[in-house]
Amino acid sequence: MMHRRGHNSSTGNGTASTDGSIPTSNGNGVAASRKQGRVTTPTPTASTTIPNGGTSASSASSLLDQRKTNRIRRRRRKKQSKSAFSTYYGQHTNYDPGSIMQLFFVGVMLLVILFFGLRNFLSSSSSATSLSSSSSDEGESQNKPFLPKLRKQNHDGNEGAPFHPHPHRKSSTKQHRNGWLQGMFQKEGPSFYDIPGAMKDIGDKTMEYAKLRKEFDELLPRNDFERQQQLVESLKPDRYDPIPQDSYNIHDCPFDPPRHYPFAWNIMDILENWPPDDPKPRPDIYQALCVFDHEVDYDKAMNYRKKEVPFIVQNDPDVLTTVERWNTPTYMDRLLSDVKYRTEFSINNHFMYWVPPRKKKNNKHGRHQQDKSSPFKSQNNADKTKKKDRLNWKHNVVQKPNNWTAPTQMMRMPYKEWLEHANVTDDNLGPDKPHWYYRLIGCGAQGSCDKDSSEFLFDELKFFQPRESLYMVQPEKQKGIHCRFGMKGVIAENHFDGSRNFIVVLGGSRRYILSHPNQCKNLALLPKEHPSGRHSAVDWSNPDLENYPEFQKAEANEVVLQAGDALYLPTNWFHYIISLELNFQCNTRSGTSGEYMPPIHDCGF
């Protein structure tokens, strides 16, 4: 028996009667409809009553016939829809499937031709611009020192096409607006240039920078070491002789550092011999650091670095290559373009680092709120905080002293604007005149650490790339590359850095006064809670010995770094910096060492 819930039983010929009977079937109804080309529902006929609600054989046959009828209807509708579409398509188009495929391939070929045509056009126009600018400058600028020509070159109006290191930023120049197109169509092919020594995931990967480097790398071949040495020597007009000391010869140091290296003198003797506010060179200086030739004394330099003592390296071919490129007229203008970088301003020649003071985030119960349900929890938190503060003084909240004002102002400006402020004659300079300090930051593996970060620094200074070398002790601990451009007379106040530091001067000259970390208590440092903590509170240009009598007991030595010189400073070594002329200086850090931590901890850091 067969039952259908919620419905009356029905047949293919008609509907079920209300009295429980099943209509009889007209066997010829469906067949007659098929002959006419359509399917219709046969009219019901007389029904036969089935006792006990059962079904007959004729009702089952009628149900099957209705299902077949429904399938026939669906197939018929689908066939009619296809026929109608084919008829419409045939009336409005004259294309068969073969013609459609031909049109598709023709369109693809046109796109390919357009792609390569636009790519070649952009490449040829850019090459013509680069060649015209380099040919106009090559005859008069090759191998000429950077410093005497900078101001003139910046006002010639013939610097060539500017380089834009940040193609995502808007610019008023047409070349920059089209830069993304050039990068899109020139990433591969014969016009692409692989920058020597570039790393895969670090550095500037824009097409604009690659084209700029290609132009100047062809102008300044890397394999001419003699030419590079001659250029660097021409950038060192002044010579400084070390004041004699009986311990060792700084130009012929032993393989192992001498005892009590480096030699130190009284700080007052150094400042009296050469006052900080006077950038005029002195013939004799209190220099005690060993000087190593990169090509001859490399093993000595590596041993001194392992011993964690300061030293100087000269004649590194990679450093000389950067020095030559950065001192070639128009290069820095095009490299830095019109991007606004960090700039510090001071009303005088003194610059002291500072961080904005901020209030402690205390709750109403004090630094650590008591938890009555867990009396040991608050004590554990306090112990962890004390340990954290002891290991790293930077976690202490900086407090604003009474009557304290920020020593410098922070701003941003393009390189040419800074150069107009910095490249002035001596009659417009002086310790009481305004000074500007320019800064570039390459973040590298840190990611985004500064707005408009200068990632090209990892390509320009490949010796500072995060890989093991003389300059990098722990590449994984590198904190980017920092470059500071100083105008003549700028003074960076005495301070220490809590990590290893390698410093290189790429143009101009700087004077460094260095002190061992064991001189911490004599240097009268500002406390760690001060906005300028770890800096000396003494004005070295005019020491106040009444308020800071311990300062006259301090010991130090000095060195003048010129173009091509690199200085290694171990962790926590003090340095006081004076710009003797317009200069380029870059540095990088790579981890810390524990040899010099105890005296710094004794000073409260």
Image (cartoon, rainbow, N blue to C red):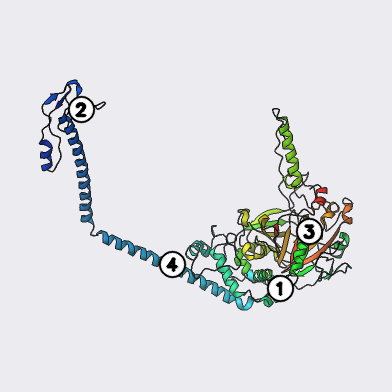
- Tell me, yes or no, whether the two marked residues, 4 and 3, touch with CB atoms within 8 Å: no
Going by the numbered disc 2, the residue's amino acid type is: Ser
The residue mark sitting in front, 2 or 3, is 2
The residue carrying mark 3 is 575
Can residue 367 be seen in this snapshot? no
The residue carrying mark 4 is 118
Q: Where is residue 404 in the image (x, y as percent from the top left)?
A: 77, 47
Distance, label 3 to label 1, CA atoms, is 25 Å
Distance, label 4 to label 2, CA atoms, is 74 Å
Within-10-Å neighbours for mark 3: few <14, some 14–19, many 20+? many
Distance, label 4 to label 3, CA atoms, is 55 Å
Indicate which disc, 4 or 3, sits on the residue closer to the N terminus: 4
Going by the numbered disc 1, the residue's amino acid type is: Val
Going by the numbered disc 3, the residue's amino acid type is: His
Indicate which disc, 2 or 3, sits on the residue closer to the N terminus: 2
Front-lying residue, 237 or 296: 296
Q: Which residue is drawn at 62% across and 69% down?
A: 331
Q: Quick one: quadrant of the N terminus?
A: top left
Going by the numbered disc 4, the residue's amino acid type is: Leu
Mark 1 element type = helix
Indicate which disc, 4 or 2, sits on the residue closer to the N terminus: 2
The residue carrying mark 1 is 232
The residue carrying mark 2 is 9
- The quadrant where residue 342 appears: bottom right
